[in-house]
Amino acid sequence: GCCPLSPAGAQTTRLLLEPPWTPAVLWDPVTLTCQGSGTPGGTTWYKDGRVWWQKGPDRLAVTESGTYQCERPGSGLSAPVPVSDAALVLQVPAWALLEGDAVTLRCRG
């Protein structure tokens, strides 16, 4: 048999980053999209661990550095996504990586 990728009860809210590189940088047009079950438009956004926007949209353009999360009723809180205003960053793909995977790194400034 095959095991599920995540245990029962694990968070199902995902915060997608466009462009899909982390940390995101403000000198790119950065868009965050919150995916999960629950009522559309019922997304709560967090910035640096504090409630930033209640009953907000599911998609937003980011204009400030910080660490963002989103929450959808019934599916929980997303993993944090950092957005940097640094002049030089080393970026990795924003999707999950496993030991042994080939990975492309980007040094950008």
Image (tube, helix red, strand yellow):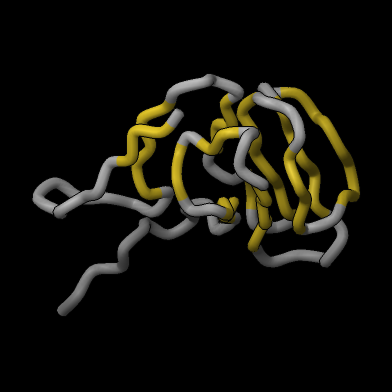
Q: Quadrant of residue 88?
A: top left
- Compared to residue 46, the image places residue 44 above or below, namely below
Q: Quadrant of residue 58?
A: bottom right
Left or right position of 37 against 1:
right
The one nearer the camera, 90 or 82, is 90
Residue located 73% across and 40% down the image: 62
Left or right position of 2 against 86:
left
Give the farthest residue toward the front. Answer: 109
Residue located 45% across and 46% down the image: 21
Q: Position of residue 41 (x, y in %)?
A: 87, 60
Q: How many marks?
A: 0
The one nearer the camera, 104 or 6, is 104
Left or right position of 1 against 24:
left
Q: Quadrant of the C terminus?
A: top left
Give the farthest residue toward the left. Answer: 100
Left or right position of 32 against 39:
left
Q: Quadrant of the N terminus?
A: bottom left
Q: Position of residue 99 (x, y in %)?
A: 14, 46
Residue located 59% across and 32% down the image: 83
- Compared to residue 1, the image places residue 33 above or below, namely above
Q: Position of residue 64 (x, y in %)?
A: 74, 28
Residue located 43% across and 59% down the image: 8
